Amino acid sequence: MGVLDNFKAAIDQIAELPEAERIDAINAIKLMLHEISPFKTEPVDCVLWVPSDEVVANDYNPNKVAPPEMRLLELSIKEDGYTQPIVAFGRNHHYEVVDGFHRNRVGKECPAIRERIRGYLPITIINS
């Protein structure tokens, strides 16, 4: 049995886990792959799904978005999903938004999106 066959068997086992455990396992695999990636110095190489209550907005966001633009962002995420992760500082279940303040708000404040992404947010961490 080759490496990819072993990996496939592990994936099949992970698929059977309860959702929260499955997400944790997927994040752990992403972090392991990130460690050996030729792009490991690039934060976008590893996007994790973390519970939204572990992500806090910064208190220094200089970017103001008018309500019509906020509705457009919400519509965009509703229709296309998250096409960019939220960039954050942090570790150990506490992440502070560096970029993506409004994407963070939409994921937390829009019930339809929050439900679809199961209360998680896509983040990439800039300080490992």
Image: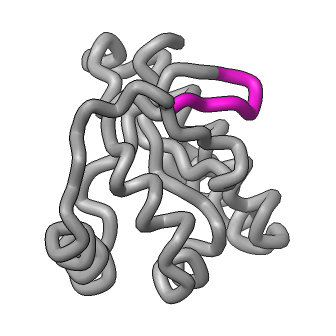
Residue 45: percent from the left, percent from the top? 32, 31
Magenta stretch in the rendered image: 91-96
What residue is rendered at 24% in x and 85% in y? 79
Residue 27: percent from the left, percent from the top? 61, 43
Q: Nearer the viewer, residue 16 or 20?
A: 20
The main secondary structure of the magenta stretch is strand
Q: Relative to residue 54, is residue 80 drawn left or right?
A: left
Residue 33: percent from the left, percent from the top? 48, 29
Q: Relative to residue 65, is residue 103 drawn left or right?
A: right
Q: Nearer the viewer, residue 81 or 28?
A: 81
What residue is rendered at 34% in x and 24% in y? 43
Q: Is residue 14 visible?
A: yes
What residue is rendered at 68% in x and 57% in y? 23
State which quadrant residue 99 falls in.
top left
Q: Eyeballing the image, is 80 above or below 89?
A: below
State which quadrant residue 100 falls in.
top left
State which quadrant residue 82 falls in.
bottom left
Residue 114: percent from the left, percent from the top? 56, 75
What residue is rendered at 36% in x and 21% in y? 37
Q: Is residue 45 visible?
A: no
